[in-house]
Amino acid sequence: RKEVEQDPGPFNVPEGATVAFNCTYSNSASQSFFWYRQDCRKEPKLLMSVYSSGNEDGRFTAQLNRASQYISLLIRDSKLSDSATYLCVVDSNDYKLSFGAGTTVTVRA
Amino acid sequence: SQTIHQWPATLVQPVGSPLSLECTVEGTSNPNLYWYRQAAGRGLQLLFYSVGIGQISSEVPQNLSASRPQDRQFILSSKKLLLSDSGFYLCAWSVPGGIYGYTFGSGTRLTVV
């Protein structure tokens, strides 16, 4: 079983729509959770950390469900510039983070 | 503030040639350092990580090697490149434990021909 699994998508949504997707992780001892954004042919960049109580950053909302071992990301009022691949990231052990393969989101005009 | 530099941005190398990619971090000390590879349309594959000078852990057996000659310098090398070594190579750093996530360099796109 992969440490972090994501629905690869693609999620094709119109501008202004809400899109949400999850990732699941296998290590119940994980303590750190993140969402990264990767644009085509660019390096991944930290979008937001995910806290146990859930957190928002503008149009982005992240949730953590420890019991079911999944993390979600919701994007409200989608913009064309939100088109990217979103990587779910979870700490594994021994100084390392595990990256999911990514969920592709395409926002169309 | 901390910055990470990675070069070159693109590289085209013939099969069998050597490789040296360099990564340096500024504005922090004793960072954890990482080398990742991303094949076209695929996820990130951790190649090597280091928690200190001269300390290298390898994740995947292959014809690549890594070295950390200085606290904030991480080098990825190969003596003889294979076609399968083509990909997008990313260096990253984190504070020990990675609790704030990783910061990536801008990457090197390597094409082996």
Image (tube, coloured by chain):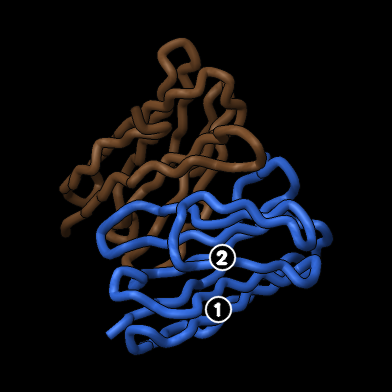
Chain colours: A brown, B blue
Disc number at residue B91?
2
Three-letter amino acid code of the residue under disc 1: Leu
Circle 2: element type:
strand
Give yes or no for contact between labels 2 and 1 (Cβ–Cβ under 8 Å).
yes
Of mark 2 and mark 1, the one earlier in the sequence is 1
* Residue closest to the eye, A30 or B85: B85
| Residue beneath the point at 38% across and 42% down | A100
Disc 2 is attached to a residue of which chain?
Answer: B
Disc number at residue B21?
1
Residue B97 position within the rendered picture, expressed as x and y whole percent measured from the top left: 71, 41
Instruction: Please indicate whether residue B101 sits to the left or right of residue A16 in the image.
Output: right
Q: Do callouts 2 and 1 point to residues on the same chain? A: yes
How many other residues sit within 10 Å of disc 2, few (<14), some (14-19) or many (≥20)?
many
| Residue beneath the point at 33% across and 30% down | A22
Residue B106 position within the rendered picture, expressed as x and y whole percent measured from the top left: 51, 72
Q: Quadrant of the C terminus of chain B?
A: bottom left
Three-letter amino acid code of the residue under disc 2: Cys
| Residue beneath the point at 34% across and 27% down | A1
Disc 1 is attached to a residue of which chain?
Answer: B
